[in-house]
C-alpha cells in the first residue's frame, strides 16, 4: 500500500481482492475445515458427508430499495441468494438461517410478508428455515442469510478445478436482472420528479422478474448428473459473468476465450439496453445477480452437453494464465475485466 | 392483533415473541433438520454427527459504538458471540464465517484490525475462519457472524429439557458488561459535552473488559464432562439472565425460584450500579451480553457440582408453569420478568 497515513481506501481493492488481502494470513487449522475462504461456500467434513455453509448480507439501499421491492419478493430472493452458493458447489441445500435487523419503521405485517416470501422459496427448493437472529436496527432493514447444504465427499465442484481446453458453459441468460434494476430506478426517479403515479413497465416483465424474484436453475445439476457430465469447476453468477469467470480462471491457473455471439442475452435485455444507450454486452458481462450457473467441462463432453437445452457453451479455457479474452463477431479480441468495489450496488 | 390498519408495531412483541409469531407456520420438512428455530443453534444431522449452525448480526449503533470500541476488540467479540451459541448446546465450534457490510468511511487498515481481533479469537478458541461475504454499506459497519460446530448425537443439550427440582447453575458473574457499557456511554457524553480528553475509567477495568472483549467459559463444559454431570437444559446468557432463564422455563414447561443472594455480581458492577443509583440486581438480571453459561442439572448432582469452583447454584426449577420468582434475603418473593424488544440496545 502506497498510503503512509494508515488510511487506505477500501475502493483500492476489488471485492475478492479485499477478502484475499485481509484473510491471507488466517489459515485453517481444524481437520474438519476442508475448504476455507475463497469459494462459494465453506466445506466442512462432517464425518460421512461434507457440509456446505454459506453466508450473505442483504442491506437496504445497497441490495434492495423498498420503494419498488415487495417484502415478499425480497424474502424469496434472499433465500435464492443463499442457496445459490450451495448449488454452485454441486451441493443440495437443506437449511437456511435468517437474521434480521429491523428499524422501528417496519410493522409486524411487513416482516410477516418477508417471511411469506422466505417460506415460498423454502417450499419450492425444499429447504428448512432452521434459525436466525432478530435485532433492532437504526437504519432500515438488514438481512443476513446463511445456507447449509450437503454433498457427497467426491461430488463437490470448486472454482479452482478448470483445465485448459475445458468448455465454458452457462445456464440461462445474462444482464436481465441488471437492466430490470435500471428500469425500476428510472421509473422511481420519474415518479419522484414528476409524480407520475403509474410507472410504465409493460413489455419488461421478464427483466423486472429477474431483478425482483429470481429463481435458480437447480434442475440443471440433475441433468448434468443424468448425462454423466462432471464439471471441473463451477460457480454461480452473482457478481457478474466476467467477474465470476475471472475468479475461476485465477483460481484454476487458466486463461479463457469467450465469444461475443455466444453470450445468451434476452430480447428484453437487449431492447432495454438500446433504450439506455448501452451495449447489451455490458450488463451481460458485468451486471450481476443473474443467479445462473457457470461451469467448465472437459472438451470430450461436447456432444453430451449439446443435448442439454438449458446449457450453452460460450467459450473455452486456455493455458495462458491471465489472458482472458472475449472474441467479437469480426474476430476482434478484447480483454475481459472485472468490476471494482463500487460497481455492484 | 388488535390493530386493524395492518400496522402492528414490532415493539408489541418481545424478541422471542416476534420470532415465534412469524415463524410459527413454517415447519421443517427435511430429515436432516433435527432442531429448527427456537434454540441457540440449528441442529443438523450430518450422518455420523450433528452439525450445529448459528448466525448473528452485529450492527453499528445497536451492538457497538466505534467511538469507544476498538476494531480489534469488536472482531474478537463478534467471534465470541457466534461460538457462544455453539457451546450453549454443548457443541464444539469448528468454523466461523464473517460477512461485512462496510461504508466508505472505513479504511483497509481498520478492517485489518477487525480481522486481527477475529484471528485472535479464532486462535484462542481453535476455530477456523472459513468464509463470508463482503459488501458495501450505506450506513456504517454491519457484521454477520455464522458459527458452525459439532456434537455427538446424544450429547447436545437444549433449552427445553429442564425438569422440576433441577438445580439452576451459572458460570461467572452478571451485569458487568452492561455496567461497563453505561460507564463508557457516560464518559462519551462527558467527552462530547465538556471536551474532557481523558475519560476516567480507572478502577473499572473489569466491567469495561467484559463489555469490550468478553470471553466464554468453554472450559466449564469439559469440567462438567469430567465430573459426569449432564445438564438437562442449557443456554448462554446473552439477552440477560432473566430473559434466558425464562426461555428455558417456557420451553421446558417449568417454573423457577432463584435467590437474590446467590446471583454472582462482581464488586465493580455493584460499585458502579451504586454510582448510577440502580439496584445491582437490575443489570445482573436484565443487562445481557454476559457470555456465561446457564444450565440446569438433576438435584442428585448437588455434591458433584459443588466441587466445581467455576459454577454457582442460584436456585431450582419447580413444577409450577409460569411461576418464575426471585426470592429476596428477607424471604420476599418477586416475579421475574423479561425485557421487551427495545430493552437491549
Image (cartoon, coloured by chain):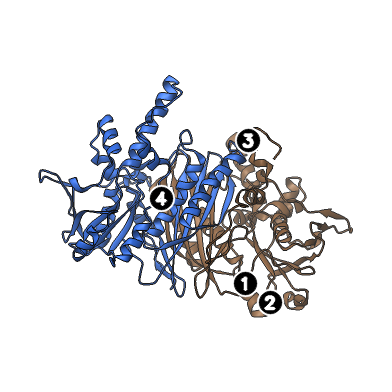
Chain colours: A blue, B brown
Q: Nearer the viewer, mark 3 or mark 4?
A: 3
- Residue at the disc numbered 3: B6
What distance separates the C-alpha of mark 2 from that of mark 4?
Answer: 42 Å
Q: Position of residue B111 (x, y in %)?
A: 42, 51
Q: Which residue is mark 4?
A: B134
Q: Within 10 angstroms of label 3, few (less than 14), some, or many (20 or more) residues?
A: few
C-beta proximity under 8 Å, tags 3 and 4 = no
Mark 2 lies on residue: B229
**Position of residue B77 measured from the top left corner of the image (x, y, whole percent):** 54, 56
Residue B10 numbered mark, or none = none
The residue carrying pointer 4 sits among few (fewer than 14), some (14 to 19) or many (20 or more) residues within 10 Å by Cα, namely: many
Image position of A31 with respect to B266: above or below: below
Labels 3 and 4: the sequence-earlier one: 3
* Chain at numbered mark 3: B
Q: Secondary structure at mark 3?
A: loop
Q: Earlier in the sequence, mark 2 or mark 3?
A: 3
Kindly identify which chain the residue marked by label 4 belongs to: B
Residue closer to the observer: B224 or A2 = B224
Chain ID at mark 1: B
* Picture layout, residue A11 above or below residue B204: above
The residue sitting at 34% across, 40% down in the picture is A178
Q: Which residue is mark 1?
A: B221
State how far apart marks 2 and 3 are (Cα): 50 Å
Given the image, what chain letter belongs to the residue carrying mark 2?
B
Amino acid at each position: 500500500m502506497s498510503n503512509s497515513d494508515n488510511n487506505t481506501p477500501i475502493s483500492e481493492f476489488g471485492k475478492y481482492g479485499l477478502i484475499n488481502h485481509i484473510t491471507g494470513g488466517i489459515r485453517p487449522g481444524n481437520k474438519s475445515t476442508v475448504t476455507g475462504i475463497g469459494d462459494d461456500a465453506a466445506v466442512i467434513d462432517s464425518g460421512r458427508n461434507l457440509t456446505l455453509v454459506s453466508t450473505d448480507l442483504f442491506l437496504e439501499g445497497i441490495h434492495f430499495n423498498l420503494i419498488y421491492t415487495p417484502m415478499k419478493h425480497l424474502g424469496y430472493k434472499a433465500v435464492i441468494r443463499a442457496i445459490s452458493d450451495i448449488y454452485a458447489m454441486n451441493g443440495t441445500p437443506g437449511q437456511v438461517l435468517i437474521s434480521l435487523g429491523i428499524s422501528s419503521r417496519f410493522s409486524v405485517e411487513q416482516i410477516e410478508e418477508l417471511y411469506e416470501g422466505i417460506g415460498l422459496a423454502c417450499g419450492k427448493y425444499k429447504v428448512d428455515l432452521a434459525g436466525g437472529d432478530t435485532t433492532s436496527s437504526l437504519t432500515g432493514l438488514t438481512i443476513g442469510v446463511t445456507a447449509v447444504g450437503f454433498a457427497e465427499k467426491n461430488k463437490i465442484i470448486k472454482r479452482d478445478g478448470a483445465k485448459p481446453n475445458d468448455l465454458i458453459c452457462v445456464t440461462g441468460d445474462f444482464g436481465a436482472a441488471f437492466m430490470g434494476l435500471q428500469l425500476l430506478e428510472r421509473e422511481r426517479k420519474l415518479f419522484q420528479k414528476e409524480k407520475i403515479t403509474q410507472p410504465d413497465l409493460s413489455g419488461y416483465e421478464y427483466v423486472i422478474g429477474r431483478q425482483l424474484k429470481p429463481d435458480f436453475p437447480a434442475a440443471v445439476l440433475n441433468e448434468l448428473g443424468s448425462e454423466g457430465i462432471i464439471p471441473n469447476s463451477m460457480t454461480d453468477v452473482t457478481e457478474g459473468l466476467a467477474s465470476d469467470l475471472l475468479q475461476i480462471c485465477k483460481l484454476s491457473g487458466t486463461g479463457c476465450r469467450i465469444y461475443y455471439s455466444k453470450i445468451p442475452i434476452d430480447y428484453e435485455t437487449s431492447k432495454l439496453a438500446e433504450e439506455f444507450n448501452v451495449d447489451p454486452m455490458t450488463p451481460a458481462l458485468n451486471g450481476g445477480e443473474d443467479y445462473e450457473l457457470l461451469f467448465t467441462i472437459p472438451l470430450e463432453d461436447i456432444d453430451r452437453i449439446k443435448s442439454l437445452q438449458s446449457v450453452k457453451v460460450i467459450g473455452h479455457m486456455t493455458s495462458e494464465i491471465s489472458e482472458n479474452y472475449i472474441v467479437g463477431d469480426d474476430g476482434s479480441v478484447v480483454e475481459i475485466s472485472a468490476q471494482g468495489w463500487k460497481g455492484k450496488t
